[in-house]
Image: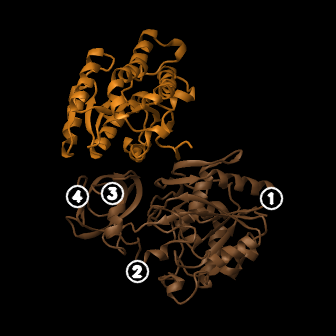
Chain colours: A brown, B orange
Amino acid sequence: MNRSELLFDRPTDLFASAPPEMRGHDRDDVRLMVSTPESDAHYSFTELPGLLKPGDLLVVNESATLPASLPAASRLANIRLNLSTRFADDLWLAEPRWSPSRPGPLPLKEHEILQIGDAKAVLLQQYPGIPRLWFARLDNPASRLMAKYGEPIHYSYAPAYPMSNYQTIFSRFPGSVEMPSAARPITTHVRHMLRSRGIGIVGIILHTGVSSLEIEDETVEHQTLYPEVFRVPEATAHAVNATHARGGRVIAVGTTVVRALETAWTPNGLRACSGATGLYIHPGSKVRAIDGLLTGLHDPVTSHLAMLSAIAGLERVKKAYSEAIRNRYLWHEFGDSHLLWRQDAN
Amino acid sequence: MKGVALVTGAGRGLGRIIATFLAGQGHDIVITARTSIEIHDVAQFLEGNDVRIVPIPGDITDPVHRTRLLQQTRAMGSLSLLVNNASDLGEIPRPELALASLERFRLTLETNLVAPIALIQESLPQLEQTRGLVVNISSDASQGGYERWGIYGSSKAALDLASKTLAAELKPRHIFVVSVDPGDMRTRMHQDAFLGEDISDRPLPEVTLPFWAWLVGQDPERITGMRYQAQGTLWEVPA
């Protein structure tokens, strides 16, 4: 697939620039578009439990968000160093940016030193195939630097809000640098309604890296993705397999869950699995572990969109996105929701 | 201070990339390769890092050379990471196994199988002190059964089994062993293997950097005995 096929126009006033609770609403007071092969239908998010069947299973990401954006003084200017992926205590993949709204790549060199408050980061090497990302060695524990200087990673469309805005009710294990936001509208109220209806909820952990990367390769399938650390626990593997066996549907809450589950998929079903996954789910991939994806609305030409095309086919995704734009859905982590059923989900 | 590493075959290609990564990580490193000019060039290239780099040219099948290497790591502290990367492709062009020179086959086995095991044997006292990690570089040829890859492939298959066996045997002594298939790369060895062919579609050995970054962050006790594909989509930590 050519990258131009993942392009679409979307008015910039459809970016959600603040969380619903900052706009005077509840977290679950967002819209929900449900896309089946036949139609795209519009609901409010609190109607989700009624749209699922008893015996269906939601899989959520239990990773919590870190204040991973650090102010850094460099030879060039005062910049931001957005930590992306923890490889070791003192070794991170990181994205130097001019500012939240202005990406790199910056003209930085190997061995260049960034000053972060009283600490230093040494830029080691660029990530192969993604020159915007650098391996950086820190002379202080990242946890200390984030606690002292960090703020949540944010981009041009939204300022930094307090950290609590970047956690969901499932956030338990700190490690993501950007909120796994699909579960954000699931309030304790919605969770209660789901459980009362007999819909299960189980967790995986996948620590997200920076999401700011567009697909740059002309051929979508050739794009380099960096790995993310994940864990699919035994109990979750069991629950997913049991749901499939009963004829229930498995709904991934967020693209991170799809990545983790598809990595742990075997011809015999899902297995418990931990490690780092570099799996890239693109239009040529088969998606087998899940029947549906509950997610937000994604930017043009991103790997997330490539994943959506793997689940529902490019045509359906494009149709759904036109529908979302026409109905003025809000984009990004504080925006509206989208439940996308697979072609053959029952 | 990250401890002392020894990287064999560090004069070019993958070994050079691993040495560069480890130097950036703050490891003191002893690097070795047969070609003196290349290994000194690598040492010079790594000078910008605030670590000690000691180039010692020589052949790892030579016991005297191995002793020199391990005396040097001892003098710098104690070996905590041994990367057995030096490999011999064998006859070029690659012959069919049925027609291959047995004399030449033995030489390949000496470099790819016996010498790495010898280095492990001889460095045990140092690795034991540091709860060290051994990384043996393998190849997909060890599992493929590809035509004309029998010499190199069988030497690497044997090394894989040795890695797994050593992992089991050495775990009680807190020495850990993994095997890593780096995948196809645009290196001199790969060009030698595909004489006269265009290999520009293969990635440079830098493609393995993320794997090395991930590997050094792992608890070696949890991953000992594993075989990894550096360009694979899953680097698993067993339960």
Whether residue B183 appears in this view of the structure is no
Q: Nearer the viewer, residue B199 or A121?
A: A121
Kind of residue indicated by mark 4: Ile
Task: Report if the CB atoms under discs 3 and 2 are less than 8 Å apart.
Answer: no
State the residue at coordinates (68%, 80%).
Answer: A46
Kind of residue indicated by mark 3: Pro
Separation (CA) of disc 1 from disc 3: 47 Å
> Please, which chain is the residue tagged with disc 1 on?
A
Is B6 on the left-hand or right-hand side of A269?
left
Separation (CA) of disc 3 from disc 2: 26 Å
Q: Residues within 10 Å of mark 1 (few under 14, many from 20)?
A: few
Q: Nearer the viewer, residue A319 or B74?
A: B74
Marking on residue A113: 4
Secondary structure at badge 2 equals: loop
Residue indicated by mark 2: A159
Asked whether the residues under marks 1 and 3 belong to the same chain, the reply is: yes
Asked whether the residues under marks 1 and 2 belong to the same chain, the reply is: yes
